[in-house]
Image (spheres, helix red, strand yellow):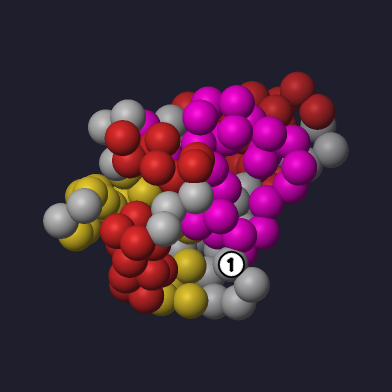
Amino acid sequence: MKVAFATTDGVNVDEHFGRAGMFSIYELNMEGYRFIEFRKFADGRDKEIEDTKGLRKEHDDKVQGKVDRLADCKIVYLTEIGGPSAARLIKKGMMPVKVKEIVSIEESLQKLSETIKTSPPPWLKKAVNSE
């Protein structure tokens, strides 16, 4: 299964979903994980999404475009996400995972990998088994 991480540096989960100009994408399975690619939406912060805040239809279309480009990922790690964006992810079968503080992608992958092997919650077991 693919996992996306909202990141500014490719090393840490350190960005809000909407503002994230880049996501690191990893493949995760029972044997481990490996880096796949960076998906860039912008250089630095995603100004297209930020600048359309308050312009309902235009903003919604921009957010939906980001969701659609990440739709092959089952989990999306981030520092913050608005309710409507979280609902869009969930509707696509993706699980937003909000981290309380900046954390390394490597540490997140290790914890997720361990959880999959030991005691995955039902949604995670389903995501792993659907691959």
Residue 92 location, x and y as percent?
53, 26
Residue at horizontal 15%, vertical 56%? Answer: 31
In the foreground, 50 or 85: 85
Q: Amino acid at mark 1?
A: Val
Tell me the quadrant of the picture where the C terminus can be found: top left
Please tell me which residue lies in front, 29 or 26: 29
Q: Residue at x 62, y 48 (%)?
A: 18
Residue 76 horizontal side relative to residue 125, left or right: right
Image point (21%, 58%), residue name: 33
Label 1: how many Cα within 10 Å (few below 14, some 14–19, many 20+): some
Looking at the picture, does residue 24 appear above or below residue 102? above
Q: Position of residue 124 (x, y in %)?
A: 44, 45
Please give left or right for residue 97 compared with residue 53 in the image. left
The residue furthest front is: 119
Is any atom of residue 39 visible in this view? Answer: no
Element under disc 1: loop
Between 24 and 45, the residue placed more toward the observer is 24
Residue highlighted by disc 1? 99
How many labels, in total?
A: 1
Q: What's the residue at 33%, 40% (across, down)?
A: 128
In the rendered image, residue 90 lying in the magenta stretch gets the answer: yes
Q: Is residue 48 left or right of residue 2?
A: right
Locate residue 15, reporting x and y percent.
Answer: 56, 63
Q: Which residues are magenta?
A: 72-98
Residue 30 location (% of width, % of height): 21, 52
| Residue 105 image-quadrant placement | bottom left
Q: Is residue 128 magenta?
A: no
The quarter of the rendered structure image containing the N terminus is top left
Q: Nearer the viewer, residue 95 or 24?
A: 95
Q: On the rendered structure, is 55 left or right of 113?
A: right
Give the residue at the far left of this rendering.
Answer: 31
